[in-house]
């Protein structure tokens, strides 16, 4: 088992990564609780819910709520329904919520925990590669039709328990989605990390040792940033590389039409293009594009309104005074934040989408 401690200005929690950890959740629980509510989704329920119930039922009364799989469940209605479940189950301030699932479940269950009785403890038990990013750092949220993660909070878990055995049941699409965030961490961190990712073929069988290695590196990149800037007032925004356009695409296409990682992949390519134009430099755009292409990322888009996409980018959480702000790269491992001229952005985005679709 590998362990990483996240130390922020407000709290400390451990991230455990290893095999079979879903059976040992109580070993990593930081204190005693009155009861447990497990929140999971319809994909994860038949695979791992029984294991987690078995791991905690001798110590605590345990109940569970299952939401439909997919980004569409990160909604105000699903949040309300889960709050009702928590109330009707009799949760109190000494209860624990376990978020069992991918990034959607972590965000949704975490937001329920953050707001139920003004906040109760929750543990992240991620079951996807994508969640190596979202489960660490304490950001929880639900979506609004006008934008992704616009309703949320900074609310860290009391532990993250990452059982890599659960990753073997992921679809190829979920593996791709998760690796997009690993690519992000590599590009904002170091060329050597990117070079390692560039050698990976996702079509090959999941190599647990190699996967654990890149997940640990990705989590460490995020931990270093979060420890310096817990509430995204400065450098934590670097972790949003690729997300300005990515989130806009998710919202404009409709949540769940493409996965988060697929949207972020396109967003990163655009951010690299904008970086090259802004700083008059050459970055490994073709290298990154070819990696996404060989690993079957969908890199073409339907006919979308450029004006609508830019309008959604204006509402991104990094933006100030309705000016689009993006994380760019001066080099691999050298992220920066820039406010962009909207006329230039319109031309660049139009050209970028046309270029993608020509290929």
Image: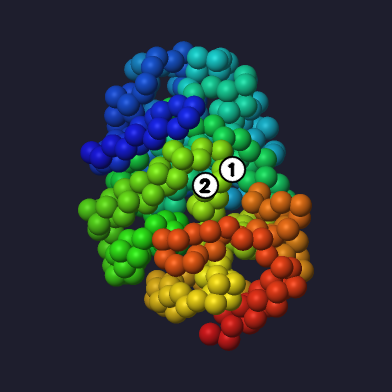
Q: Residue at x 59, y 50 (%)?
A: 71
Q: On screen, 228 above or below 242?
A: above
Asked if disc 1 and disc 2 are in contact, CB closer than 8 Å, the reply is: yes
Q: Does residue 330 lie above or below 314 as drawn?
A: below
- Give the camera-side residue of 328 and 25: 328
Query: Residue 134 versus residue 5: which sits nearer the camera?
Result: 5
Q: Would residue 228 be found to the left or right of residue 165 on screen?
A: right
Task: State whether residue 60 is above or below residue 145.
Answer: above
Secondary element under disc 2, as helix, strand or loop, is helix
- The residue that mark 2 highlights is 236
Instruction: Give x and y (percent) for residue 130.
Output: 44, 52
Residue 197 appears anywhere in the view:
no
**Residue drawn at 34 percent across, 34 percent down:** 5
The span from disc 1 to disc 2 (Cα, nearest Å) is: 7 Å
Q: Please provide percent x and percent y for residue 2.
A: 25, 40
Q: Position of residue 329 (x, y in %)?
A: 50, 65
Q: Determine which quarter of the picture holds residue 293.
A: bottom left
Vertical side of 12 occupied by 217: above or below: below
Numbered badge on residue 233 = 1
């Amino acid at each position: 088992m590998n362990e990483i401690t996240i130390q922020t200005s407000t709290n400390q929690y451990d991230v455990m990564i290893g095999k079979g950890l879903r059976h040992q959740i109580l070993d990593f629980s930081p204190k005693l609780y009155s009861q447990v509510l497990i929140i999971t989704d319809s994909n994860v329920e038949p695979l791992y819910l029984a294991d987690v119930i078995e791991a905690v039922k001798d110590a605590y009364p345990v109940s569970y709520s299952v939401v439909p799989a997919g980004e569409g469940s990160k909604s105000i209605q699903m949040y309300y329904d889960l709050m009702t479940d928590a109330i009707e189950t009799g949760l109190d301030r000494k209860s624990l919520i376990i978020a069992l699932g991918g990034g959607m479940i972590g965000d949704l269950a975490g937001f329920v925990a953050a707001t139920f009785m003004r906040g109760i403890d929750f543990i992240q038990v991620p079951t996807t590669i994508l969640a190596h990013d979202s489960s660490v750092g304490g950001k929880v949220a639900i979506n609004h039709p006008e934008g992704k993660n616009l309703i949320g909070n900074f609310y860290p878990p009391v532990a993250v328990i990452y059982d890599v055995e659960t990753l073997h049941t992921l679809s190829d699409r979920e593996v791709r989605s998760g690796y997009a965030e690993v690519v992000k961490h590599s590009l904002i961190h170091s060329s050597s990390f990117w070079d390692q990712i560039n050698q990976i073929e996702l079509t090959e069988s999941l190599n647990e040792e190699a996967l654990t290695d890149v997940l640990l590196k990705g989590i460490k990149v995020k931990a270093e940033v979060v420890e310096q800037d817990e509430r995204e007032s400065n450098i934590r925004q670097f972790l949003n590389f690729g997300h300005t356009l990515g989130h806009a695409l998710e919202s404009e296409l409709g949540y769940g039409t493409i996965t988060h990682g697929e949207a972020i992949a396109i967003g990163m390519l655009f951010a690299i293009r904008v970086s090259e134009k802004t700083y008059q430099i050459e970055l490994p755009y073709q290298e990154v594009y070819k990696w996404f292409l060989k690993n079957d990322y969908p890199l073409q888009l339907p006919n979308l309104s450029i004006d609508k996409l830019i309008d959604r980018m204006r509402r991104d959480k990094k933006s100030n005074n309705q000016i689009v702000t993006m994380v760019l790269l001066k080099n691999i491992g050298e992220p920066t934040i820039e406010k962009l001229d909207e006329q230039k952005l319109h031309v660049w985005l139009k050209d970028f989408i046309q270029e993608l679709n020509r290929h």
